[in-house]
Image (cartoon, helix red, strand yellow):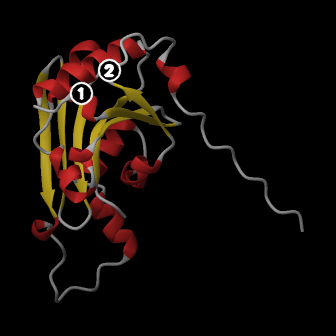
Amino acid sequence: MEAHGGYLCRFEELAPGELVRVAREAVIEEGIAPDSCSLVVSALEKPRVLRFAYDGPHTYGRRGARWYQTHHAFARRLSCVLKGVVHAYAFDPDELEQVVGFGGGRKVGGETMRYEDAELPDEDADELDEQSFERLKARWPLGHLAKVLGVAREELVRIARAPATLLDLNEAGVAGTLEALLPPPPRPTAAPVP
């Protein structure tokens, strides 16, 4: 499982040109040249959850995932355009997970969980079985956000691998709808015929 980060929200229709404008302004505010990156847009199918992330040298690997811990300009700015909350998140499977929510341009909550600080049963207690561990992780930041968004925690953990579309931040006139730009959902594979 690889480290990743980005911004998550429920699906709302948004003009792609407006999305590019917000992403461009935010990355400039963060001190990154907009011609050095693109915006990755992907979605979970049901319920529709959008993920936005920058595709650039500053977002690769563990260090890149951790970049999202402190760079929230996109979430703050996008939350001014959308009706709902936009969540900045960082997931480092070796160390931590963090979620920070923004609504109307303001921080509306957030939590960081360092795995070394996780409250696990005492060593004297019975071993933590897989089902109990999954219930425990559901209370951690990504588990709580998954519940808010109406998806499973594991879906959020794997969202960076969802089919995605890249938007060039220097492209002024992106036409169409956000829905049309999203990659089609994966088609179910047919079961082998016995």
The answer to whether any part of residue 26 appears in the image is yes
The residue located at (29%, 21%) in the rendering is 84
The answer to whether any part of residue 82 appears in the image is no
Left or right of 40 in this view: 136: left
Q: Which residue is mark 1?
A: 34
The residue located at (13%, 35%) in the rendering is 109
Determine the residue located farthest toward the bottom in the rendered image.
124
Q: Residues within 10 Å of mark 1 (few under 14, many from 20)?
A: some
The residue located at (22%, 49%) in the rendering is 90
Residue 71: % across, % down: 13, 37
Q: Is residue 45 above or below residue 1?
A: above
What is the distance, in whole Å, between disc 1 and disc 2 at their CAs?
A: 7 Å
Residue 50: % across, % down: 40, 32
Residue 170's disc number: 2
Cβ atoms under marks 1 and 2 closer than 8 Å:
yes
Q: Amino acid at mark 2?
A: Asn
